[in-house]
Image (cartoon, helix red, strand yellow):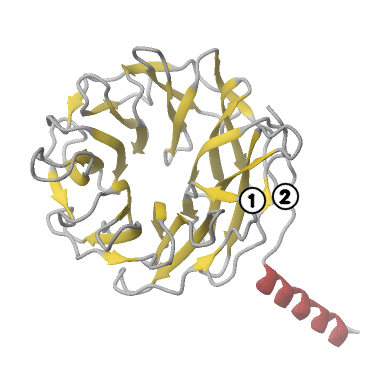
Amino acid sequence: MKYIMGIAFILIIGLFHISNSFACHRTPANQPTCIDMEVDKDGNIHVVYIDYAPNNVFYIRSNDRGITWSSPVSIHVSNKEAKRPRIAVAKTGVIHVIWVETGKRNGRVLVNSSVDGGATWSTPVRIALTNGSTDVSTFGKSKVYAIWKSDNPPDIFFKRSNDMGMTWNRKVNLSNSPGLEEHPVVTVSQTGKIYAVWEEEGPVGVVPPGTYYVYFSLSADYGRTWSPPQHLCGSVGDFLRPQIHIDNGGHIHMVWSDNRLGVKRETFYCVSADEGTTWSSPVNVSGTAGDSLRGYVTTDSFGKVYVTWEDTTNVPKEDIFFSSSNDGGATWSNRMNISNSVIRSYRAPIGTDGMDNMYVVYEEVKKDSFSGKRMSNIFFTRSLDGGITWSQSVSLFDWRLP
């Protein structure tokens, strides 16, 4: 009997390793979109998203590696359109969310926080007027950092809070450039140094109008002063949507997409081991037949690098692709389609927990076969073996019409 039970146990473990599947209950939603995700030090998965029916900012979480999820909690509701939510979780467990509430002239950058794991939320604090992109990060017990693209002037600005987001210092202009800027990202190292990257339009008369480069700046004094913006990773191609991640050793990992190799875009990677002073040569991570867009990057405790991106190889739909590197980004694994959907999949943030498990959420969009209306949903997948196998993706919500 023990022998039979032992065989059964081994078979069960083996099946789990191969399929890595699990059950996930669904929660009500109308049109969830514009997702962001963070995995905290305890392995809890935090997701923020917009639901346009009505214009709500919502938060959900999983405390069991994505098997079950909380009911959605409304962070903010408004008659104005909400966009671009971003989330950061402090080591104390305090959750901070930043987003833009759009307006005809000036939108509002709002920040909200929760000290009880997302069950309740404070009153949103307005820190800027803009319709541009935003991002947020944290350090220590109480420091919160926000970055955004301003409408007028069209520069990248930064603010800091020393009291968990209740009050904020004066804004600092990081770019201070005549060119247009987009898509700022901010992150913090374990030593408290703050790093920011963004897109910036190339010099007039030097590159075609609308051609963007990636710029980088850092602060070593908790955001009081910043280094002059540094142009990164060459001047070939039109750079889009940079993302950065800092590992436990202080290495800065960056991904972005550009068209330096021709008409279509590829997802590129470079790394800095000296706090951004020098950077490695760009490496093409994607190398697929289609366009590769919206890359995300993270690492595990061993320094292994993981990247996701959306890819148009299987047109007319888009898929979420994944690749990993064991040698600091010099070489990359075979590209893996981890969404494998029959409709469009896009925007796929990736994170790891303290046990080096990997989690990805992404969006899918389709049209209702009867009404023709747009429908959106959020899907989740995970890998418990370093990206070798991935669970079957599950929808966190039911498909519904707006």
Q: Which residue is mark 2?
A: 24
Which label sits on residue 113?
Answer: none
Residue displayed at 56% across by 34% down:
117
> Mark 1 Cα within 10 Å, few/some/many (few <14, many 20+)?
many
Q: Are marks 2 and 1 in contact (CB under 8 Å)?
A: yes
Image spot of residue 402 (x, y percent): 68, 27
Answer few, some or many: residues within 10 Å of disc 2's Cα (few below 14, many 20 plus, some between 14 and 19): some
Q: Residue furthest right?
A: 1
Is 233 located above or below residue 398 in the figure? below
Amino acid carrying label 1: it is Gly
In the visual, does 253 lie left or right of 60? left
Q: Secondary structure at mark 2?
A: loop
What kind of residue is marked 2?
Answer: Cys
| Total numbered badges shown on the rendered structure | 2
Which comes before the other along the chain, label 2 or label 1? Answer: 2
Query: Is 63 on the left-hand or right-hand side of 313?
Result: right
Q: Is residue 188 left or right of residue 386?
A: left
Q: Give the residue at x 17% y 60%.
A: 279
For disc 1, the marked residue is 66
